[in-house]
Structure formats: structure tokens, C-alpha cells
Image (cartoon, rainbow, N blue to C red):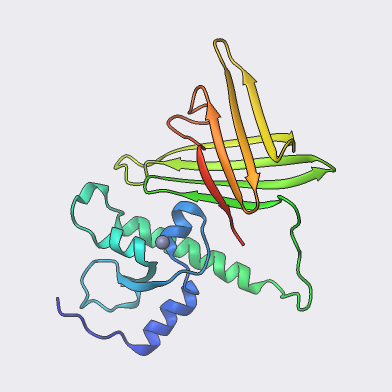
């Protein structure tokens, strides 16, 4: 398994088809941001430079993919190939859209997309303004990214008005009230849940610090 240098054309093909987006980031988290990374060999044989065996991965996911500590926890080749296909299709779609030169939509206030990434959990929140002080909050979270049986997920959707920089959701349950508070400071959200974590999905939690995606 001697590493052979990649053919320059193949290297360019991998980089342009992915546009340096990591297909695992995209497949697991819908994270299509530009990443620093490397071209990975999906069969882990660095001598196999066939185009179909190559994928651009961010450094973290390249390490995770290549680590052989516990096979069952690792991402499978087939899984990554699916994410790669999905990413390439999404990019091709996106790049077909016309570019608006000289115009940009400026998001004001708290609207936007916020994400939270930890070793085992990924969550995202999207805040959209409905009217003067009413907001729609949509969220998605996955827990157990390295779980061999696949991760658990949860999703939320609610409307709230902004009060003291906080969006609040409450539901009266038999014993206790479930509450979720999203405290917004600049480009950050601090989410805290009280009672019944998992309200929005088994083992799924939204607790933690989120950062707004630019
Ligand atoms: Zn990645």
C-alpha cells in the first residue's frame, strides 16, 4: 500500500465536484460550508487512485474515517459514497442557480441558521421572522454520531415572541412542564431544556451553545 501521487486531473475533478465541501459533514449535518481537508481513499488503500475511490473530507472526518480502532463504530464506505453522491448533486443544483451580482440579502436581527457541534451530537436551529416580534423556530438534532445502530434524532418546531432576548417554548405535561429557552446573544444561542430531555425525540437534546452560520 504505497501512496502514489494522484493524477492532477483526478485531483482537480475531486476538488471541483466537491468544491471543497466534506461529504460526511454534508451527509450527517447538512453542513455544506467550505472546509479545510484532504482527499481520502474510501477503501483505505492509498495505492488505489481510481476516481470512484476518492472523496474530499474535512480533517476531522478524514481522521474518523481512517481510524481503525473499532470497526463497528466507523463510517462505512457505502455510507460515505452515498453522502458523496448527495453532496455532488446538491452542489450541481446550487451552482446552476443564477448569481445576483450587486445584490445580497442581508439578514437582520436574530434571523438565521445556528449550529452546535459536539463529538456525539449535532444540532441546528433556524429562526425565521413571522411578523413584528413573532418568530418561527425549526430545529433538528442528532445524537450518537458514532453509534453502531445509527444516531437518534429529534426535531422541533414552534413559534414564539422574543422576550428579553429569549425565545421560549413550554408544554404542560402531567408531572412537570417541559420548557426550552433559547437565549440569544449576538451570534450565539444558549439553549436550555428543563424536564424531560428527549421531549422532541428519544435521547435527543437541544441543550448547549449554538453559533450562527454566516
Ligand atoms: Zn467533515
Q: 174 or 7, which is in the foreground? A: 174
Give percent across and percent down for residue 95: 62, 73
Q: Is residue 4 left or right of residue 28?
A: left
Residue 22 occupies which quadrant of the picture? Answer: bottom left
Q: Ligand 1: which quarter?
A: bottom left
Residue at 35 percent across and 62 percent down: it is: 60
| Quadrant location of the C terminus in the rendered image | bottom right
> Residue 172: x, y in percent?
63, 16
Residue 203 image position (x, y, % from top left):
42, 31
Q: Is residue 161 above or below residue 12?
A: above
* Residue 212 rendering spot, x and y as whole percentages: 60, 55
Q: Nearer the viewer, residue 83 or 214?
A: 214
The foreground one among 115 and 56 is 115
What residue is at 20 percent from the left and 80 percent from the top?
A: 3
Quadrant where the N terminus sits is bottom left
Q: Residue at x 43, y 63 (%)?
A: 23
Q: Seen in the image, is 193 located left or right of residue 132?
A: left
Q: Residue furthest left?
A: 1
* Residue at 35% from the left image edge and 66% from the top image edge: 59
Examine the rendered structure and indicate whether residue 130 appears above or below residue 21. Answer: above
Amino acid at each position: 500500500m504505497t501512496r502514489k501521487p494522484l493524477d492532477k486531473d483526478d485531483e482537480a475533478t475531486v476538488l471541483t465536484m466537491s468544491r471543497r465541501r466534506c461529504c460526511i459533514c454534508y451527509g450527517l449535518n447538512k453542513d455544506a460550508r467550505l472546509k479545510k481537508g484532504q482527499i481520502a481513499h474510501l477503501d483505505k488503500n492509498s495505492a488505489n487512485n481510481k476516481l470512484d475511490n476518492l472523496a474530499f473530507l474535512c480533517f476531522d472526518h478524514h481522521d474518523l474515517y481512517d481510524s481503525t480502532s473499532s470497526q463497528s463504530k466507523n463510517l462505512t464506505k457505502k455510507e460515505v459514497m452515498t453522502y458523496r453522491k448527495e453532496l455532488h448533486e446538491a452542489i450541481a443544483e446550487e451552482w446552476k442557480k443564477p448569481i445576483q451580482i450587486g445584490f445580497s440579502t442581508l439578514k437582520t436581527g436574530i434571523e438565521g441558521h445556528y449550529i452546535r457541534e459536539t463529538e456525539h451530537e449535532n444540532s441546528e436551529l433556524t429562526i425565521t421572522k413571522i411578523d413584528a416580534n413573532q418568530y418561527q423556530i425549526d430545529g433538528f438534532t442528532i445524537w450518537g454520531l458514532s453509534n453502531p445502530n445509527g444516531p437518534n434524532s429529534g426535531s422541533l418546531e414552534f413559534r414564539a415572541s422574543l422576550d428579553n432576548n429569549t425565545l421560549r417554548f413550554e408544554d404542560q405535561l402531567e408531572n412537570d412542564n417541559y420548557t426550552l429557552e433559547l437565549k440569544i446573544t449576538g451570534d450565539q444561542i444558549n439553549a436550555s431544556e428543563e424536564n424531560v430531555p428527549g421531549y422532541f425525540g428519544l435521547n435527543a437534546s437541544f441543550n448547549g451553545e449554538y453559533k450562527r452560520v454566516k
